Image (cartoon, helix red, strand yellow):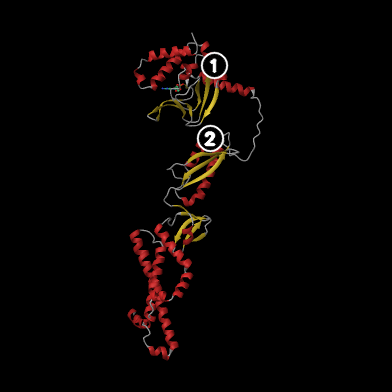
Amino acid sequence: MFAVLLNLVLPAFAPASSENLKTDAPGFYWVQLLTKIALWLGLMFVGVRLASAFIFDLIFRLRKGREAPSLVRDLFSIVAYVLIVALILKYYFDLSLGALLSGSALLGVILGLALQDTLGNLFSGISLHADKPFDVGDVITVGKWTGVVESVTWRAAKIRTFTNHIVLVSNSQIAKEAIEVCPRDNANARLIFFNALYANSPAKVMQVVRTAIREAENVRREPAAFVRIRNLGDFGVDYEIKYWLEDYARFNDTDALIRQRIWYAFNRAGLSFAYPTQTLYIEQPKAIASLAAEEQTLTGRLSATGIFAPLNADELSQLACASRSHTYAPGETIIRAGDEGDSMFVVHHGHVSVQINDNGQPRTVATLGEGDFFGEMALFTGEPRSAHVVAAEETEVLEIGHEAMKSVFDTNPHLAESLGATIAQRRAGLAASAAAEDEEKVSAGVITSIKRFFGLG
Ligand code: CMP
């Protein structure tokens, strides 16, 4: 049946050979000719579509395992259509496309002008395809448009914006503009800004926020998000969060989720956002009750510090009044090796690391916690600071100066012995060679220099 159909239809495709028909019945001749051409064009359309589907949907997909780029499909179709039309022209009118184009300068100019934009887009599309600056699924920003690339054809790139609108940006525009590309399988980062009151400790704010966003959906665990101070603003401390997304196309939702997590975390931790305010401070002497409570806390801390244990309540309270409290950020240096020093410190809250220089790298020789003291070596011997002391976390220390210690020694001369032992021990710990040194000899030497330094008998 198919053969019969072909026999019936095929003659219709044959060229008009009869010159007689053309002159005898020109109307019928042209109707027949146009019908044949229309049939060929229809066949061409179906054939090219089928060939394209076979090559790209079947063979390309099987070999490459992915969808063929629309631009390649479009180019294939265009070339196939042009070739077939050239064949039809040659077959029926004995016209060569090349001769037609080169023979008619005017036609060339008209075509060139008419197709200027189209050809521009086509060639930009080809160069985009060769260059491959982005792929389907990537998030790009061109001009004022940001969205996910849905396809790239020979004419334009189709972008779905975050308001679910489709924007078609022509290839020639893309070729001209700067494009920001966030590739789908890349670790793309986002910045989020927030602020907090000056009264809220930065270490605490950063810790709370870091914990709050760690578990948020679509936030990459590696690299881990980090929080840092961006500015000391007019109304509060400005922070920024840098985090990396699993799926960048969902950054709007993820940003919103992170902001929500920060709000709840602030609420639980008793932290506050800064908003445009002006704080009017009226200087008032501290309430006697609060001063007494503060002094009691400091006295408690000093009495729990080993070397001050022998002091009585009055002496401890005098020492507490003479001490000054300082708070250091994580990683901040409290004491620098080699500096002069005329005070010592007691760790009130937090931890510090005692570090020495080991071939240009800091090496921790000891970690001191609440109730431990440091800085006594330079204070009691007059030598330069023997090591760096660095806050391992947010740390509050109480600083006790030379004068305050002198009055403590005046009434408790035997303190020099216990301090001398500690200093000798720490010195031995500091120097590897000191391990072999006679600790007692070192201790006796230290006690003598302490007494000399404080002018004690
Ligand atoms: P100073 O030398 O004044 O300054 C650095 C301080 O680090 C030092 O006093 C000690 O208080 C402390 N330090 C030095 N070595 C050690 C150690 N081995 N263990 C604990 N603390 C130390």
Q: Residue at x 36, y 69 (%)?
A: 51
Q: What is the number of the mark on residue 90? A: none
Q: Nearer the viewer, residue 180 or 63?
A: 180
Q: Nearer the viewer, mark 1 or mark 2?
A: 1
Q: In the displayed structure, would residue 164 be above or below residue 212?
A: below
What's the residue type where badge 1 is placed? Glu
Q: CA distance from mark 1 to mark 2?
A: 34 Å
- Label 1 sits on a secondary structure element that is helix
Residue 391 in percent (x, y) is at 47, 29
Q: What is the number of the mark on residue 202? A: 2
Circle 2 residues within 10 Å: few <14, some 14–19, many ≥20: many
- Label 2 sits on a secondary structure element that is helix
Residue 322 in percent (x, y) is at 56, 19
In the image, the residue with mark 1 has its CB under 8 Å from the nearest atom of ligand 1: no
Q: In the displayed structure, would residue 443 be above or below residue 324?
A: above
Image marks 1 and 2: residues in contact by CB distance under 8 Å: no
From the image, tell me which residue sits under label 1: 403
Query: Which part of the image, by quadrant, shows the N terminus?
Result: bottom left
Residue 145 in percent (x, y) is at 52, 56
Q: Quadrant of ligand 1?
A: top left
What's the residue type where badge 2 is placed? Pro
